[in-house]
Amino acid sequence: MRLVAGSELRYGSLFSGIGGIDLGLDLAGFECAWQVEIDGYCRQILDKHWPGVPKYKDIYEVKGSEIEPVDIICGGFPCQPVSQAGKRVGVDDERWLWSEFYRLICEIKPRWVVAENVPGLLSANFGRAFAEVLRDLAEGGYDVVWDVFPAGGPGGVGALHQRQRIFIIGKLAKSESKRHGRRTGKKRRIKRRKFQQSKQRRSKVGSKTKGRSKSHGDNMADNDRKRLKKQLWPQSVEEESIERSSWWCTEPSVGRVANGVPNRVDRLRALGNAVVPQVAYKVARMIYEYTEKEK
């Protein structure tokens, strides 16, 4: 079922899980071209709901030149390196797979990038992890906006749990979209120094100009970038919404998984890593409306 009429935009899904982001994009009228997911149980779910869509197992083995080019690359890269529940070593964690996400972005060069993660991404490694994501996208030629979306509560989609997630949207700059050829994705290191976490809830990053990428501390006077931010993010989430002190109490209205349920552990893990489709739909709908206005 689609809530929006069909669109010509096709997307590729990385770290697909059980397809929360994918379902949100489907509801917005986009069409799935392929999915990448290493977990066997999750791939069973994907096969059931997206039959006929090519599935790839290991992101390390996926090459941009060997898969269908797409308009959108989306995915929630693993949150363990930045989650409040872990050691939060960020870019120094072997599970930090943003570099593979970015490699495929460079190899495919989609018009849009949608990356999702937990709010802990903002502060892990004193901001190094988040800075790497923004810098890579900027150097790759993308204008970037980001915000934190809750599933429940104020600004949410009516869910019984908050499940706040940061969504980062990159739009390929017009100057970059006219270029031919592919860029090679190389993971660039950030010097080991503390980055002061910005208190601003939203940020935007400029594309590479004159050999230097603009950061969110630079003067961003570009009209297209301003228009992108204004149209994609009509509202922001308050700063305190991601602070540890504002964590909510146990929600008694949310049912717990009972013993005896088939694949109980697999279901728990898959649901715990999943994205609420209605939240992904909100983000996808913003992209849809923006592309419609560009026509």
Image: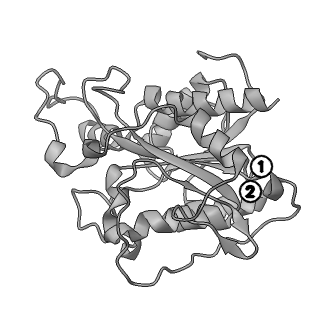
Q: Specify whether 270 is left or right of 34.
A: left
Residue 69 — which label? Answer: 1
> For this rendering, which residue is in front, 256 or 155?
155
Badge 1 amino acid: Pro
Q: Establish if 51 lies above or below 167.
A: above
Where residue 246 sits in the image (x, y, percent)? 17, 42
Q: Specify whether 71 is left or right of 271.
A: right
Q: CA distance from mark 2 to mark 1?
A: 6 Å
Badge 2 amino acid: Ile
Where residue 223 sits in the image (x, y, percent)? 71, 46
Element assignment for label 2: helix
Viewport quadrant of the N terminus? top right
Viewport quadrant of the C terminus? top right
Q: Earlier in the sequence, mark 2 or mark 1?
A: 1
Q: Establish if 29 lies above or below 103.
A: above
Disc 2 packing (10 Å; few <14; some 14–19; many ≥20):
many
Location of residue 59 by image quarter: bottom right
**Residue at 32% across, 65% down:** 124
